[in-house]
Image: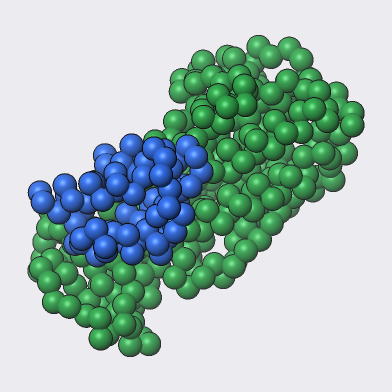
Chain colours: A green, B blue
Amino acid sequence: MNTDFGRVVVIGYGKATGEILKYTDDRQADYGYELEFIEHEPHVLGVTRQICEERGIPFASMPDKRELAGYLGEIQEKTLIVSASNNFLFPAAVVERENITIINFHNALLPEYPGRNAPSWVIYQGEARTGITWHYVTAGVDEGNIIIQKSCEIGSDTKAYELTETLMDLAYEGFCECFDSVLQENAEAKPQGFSPERRMYRSSEIPGGGVLHPEEPTENAYRLLRSVDYGKSGIFPPVQMEIDGKRAEILRYRKIAPEKKKEGTDMRYLPFADGELLKIKYRML
Amino acid sequence: MEEKILEVLEEYCEEALSYTGDNMMEEGVIDSFTVINIVSELEDVFDIEIDAKYVVAENFRNKEAIIELVRQLVEE
């Protein structure tokens, strides 16, 4: 198999990145490119370093944006950069270089939900479906032509971290499907076709402002809680609510059947329309 | 307590019960998403808070480490 790319650089963190790293390593023999991995955002439970060590893949940690931009900007050979679960925004000086092609995995069906934390926003907005997009990277955020998309349903109890896991599996699946065409430079990439209402989600934005209003339908509260639930990762601060005129932060929540209701301290139950209950454990601030 | 913890592990990662090594994360027995599920369930079952500082590979290296972590937090 032939490609003009002499080098493949994988950047990212998390499950999809690890799988993609292994896949690109496995395919190295087919194309003969040099492979390397750059860690820009370390993950406390990440396994990419181990994968690199086990397989002998060059590994570099570059948490500094300027250092990373400078490193990429000095690459001379024709290079494919695979940005998988990566929040580093490639500067124009890198993107516009003729010898560099960058593909990025976005965790939504572009052009919908560009920007950060898309799984949270699709849950919060009550979408029934979402998916992933592999696209070419341009100087604009999440604006490049679409290479491949994969979609999935969003369950009525799906939490952000669960959806993220599904999307990472889809990202890996999509990557395997399009990798050859990208390397061979014959991928049929399609323009996104932006609507005037296109809205960019920023990292500073929190669904619902991060505040739960118990007087609203419990379905809304549950959607809010699920949308910001990434376990202990701290992507979002704990959701807050007002209790007896004072602020409290929600520690955990669960949808339960009414017969499982147990009184406890710092606990509140909100009724769903179908009779089930939303159990909320909180801490006064 | 141990029995309850093993029940949680069985629900979310049965393989962890028979694992005898010392690094479930590295060896692919458990991944970060499964850890989130286990943490969430353990918090609910034992009514404890497992702070993010405890959610590291070291504390999820095998079932014994998880049991020890919960034991410490319950006794606090």
Q: Nearer the viewer, residue A162 or A144?
A: A162
**Residue located at (74% from left, 45% from top):** A176
Q: Position of residue B3 (x, y in %)?
A: 26, 62
Q: Nearer the viewer, residue A64 or A14?
A: A14
Q: Nearer the viewer, residue A208 or B12?
A: B12
Q: Position of residue A11 (x, y in %)?
A: 59, 30
**Left or right: A52 in relation to B20:** right
Residue A140 shows in this picture: no
Q: Looking at the rendering, which quadrant does residue A129 occupy?
A: bottom right
**Residue located at (56% from left, 70% from top):** A128
Q: Is residue A61 above or below residue A161?
A: above
Q: Is residue A220 above or below residue A13?
A: below
In the picture, the quarter occupied by the N terminus of chain B is bottom left
Q: Looking at the rendering, which quadrant does residue A175 occupy?
A: top right
Q: Looking at the rendering, which quadrant does residue A105 occupy?
A: top right
**Left or right: A211 in relation to A2:** left
**Left or right: A282 in relation to A105:** left
Q: Position of residue A207 (x, y in %)?
A: 39, 57
**Residue located at (51% from left, 15% from top):** A67
Q: How many marks?
A: 0
**Residue located at (26% from left, 77% from top):** A270
Residue A218 shows in this picture: yes
Q: Position of residue B28 (x, y in %)?
A: 51, 43
